Structures are given as C-alpha cells and as structure tokens.
Amino acid sequence: MTRPIAFWIGLFCAVTVPIAAAGFSPLLAWRDPIYIVAGFAGITAMVGLLLQTLLASRALPTIHPMTQRKLHRIMGGVLVAAIIAHVGGLWISSPPDVIDALLFASPTSFSLWGVIAMWGIFATAALAVYRRRLRPRTWRHIHKALAVIIVLTTVLHAYLIDGTMETFTKIGLGLVLLFTTYRAVFKQAR
C-alpha cells in the first residue's frame, strides 16, 4: 500500500469513525432533534479542525499546495458555520445554559473551554477579514497562537463532556488533532 493511500484511509477513519460512533450513542434516544443537530455540529467542527490543521501544513497528499491553501480558507468559513449551528442549537434547546456558558457562569467546566474555543474561532475569522492590513509575520504569529488556543480548548471541551461522542473515538480524534496541530504550528516553516 502506498503512503498516500494509507494516509487517505487513516484520515477517512479519523473523520468518520467518531461521527459514526456518536450516531449509535444510546443517549440520542432521549434528545430533541435540534439538540442532536447541535451536538453533531460540534463534532463536525472538531473534525473540521483536524482538516484545517492538515490543510494549514499542506499535509494532504495528491492535493496541490495552492488548492490546500484555498480549502483552508473555505474550511474556516465552514468552522464558523458549524460553531454557529452548535451554539444556536444549544440556545434553542436551553437558553439559560447557553447564557451561563457565555457569561462564564456555568457550573460545568466543559462550557468554559467550549466558549473560549468559540471566541477563538470568531477572533480568527475576524482577523482573516482584516488580514491584508496586518504584516504577514504578525498575521502568522496571531493565527498560530489562536489555532493552539482553539485546538487545546476544543479537545478539553469534548473530553470533559460525557455525551454523544463515544469515549475512545473522542480521545483518538483529540490526540490526532493535537498531533496535527503541533505539526502545523511548530514543525512547519512558513
């Protein structure tokens, strides 16, 4: 088996197995449809972060680096949409819980990490709009710092939730995401 084929099979498994495992969660039986959609939007965002790190480091074999750069920008928009769907769905399901989380008054620590990740995504998107006004080096440093914050807080957020995501696939996805982020931020000369 060639390396690119092995890579694509591994990535396919890293992306689909956590989503499929969550789809079989017994906890879904007691949830409203909007809550389920919101939860899967969160899982999709976490998978999207994995793809973002791979695109940022131009690590996807057989895809031209310039295409990966364009896809990285598109995926940024997808991440913002997924976070809006995640938080919006949770808002519809339970506004008081979302208000507590946004005000950092929630008794659950996973809410804190999720809100920090959300604001990190939004800050990155806002900075991307004004990227041309920043020096390239300044943009890279800020973007990389925000990426590290987003990934660390996302992994903590997901890990601390005892919910739809299956434990082993959640941990596996988190570890892969941490590794690819490390590689994208600290191992790539850009």
Image (tube, rainbow, N blue to C red):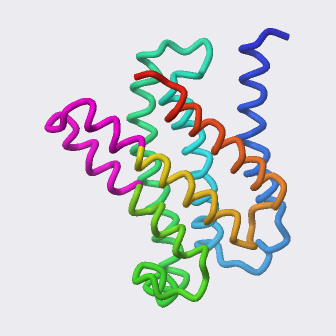
Which of the 4 quarters of the picture holds residue 177? Answer: top right
The answer to whether 153 is drawn above or below residue 66 in the figure is below
The residue lying at 46 percent from left, 46 percent from top is: 147
Side (left or right) of 132 relative to 175: left
The answer to whether 107 is drawn above or below residue 180 in the figure is below
Which of the 4 quarters of the picture holds residue 118? Answer: bottom left
Task: Name the residue nearer the viewer: 76 or 28.
Answer: 76
The residue lying at 51 percent from left, 37 percent from top is: 52
Side (left or right) of 18 relative to 149: right
Bounds of the magenta segment: 121-144
Which of the 4 quarters of the picture holds residue 170? Answer: bottom right
* Residue 100: % across, % down: 47, 87
* Residue 151: % across, % down: 55, 51
Side (left or right) of 34 relative to 117: right
Residue 30 showing in the rendered view:
yes
The residue lying at 74 percent from left, 42 percent from top is: 16
Task: Name the residue nearer the viewer: 131 or 40.
Answer: 131
Task: Name the residue nearer the viewer: 157 or 40.
Answer: 157
The residue lying at 69 percent from left, 71 percent from top is: 161
Query: Quadrant where the N terminus lies?
Result: top right
* Residue 74: % across, % down: 41, 36
The secondary structure that most of the magenta stretch takes on is: helix
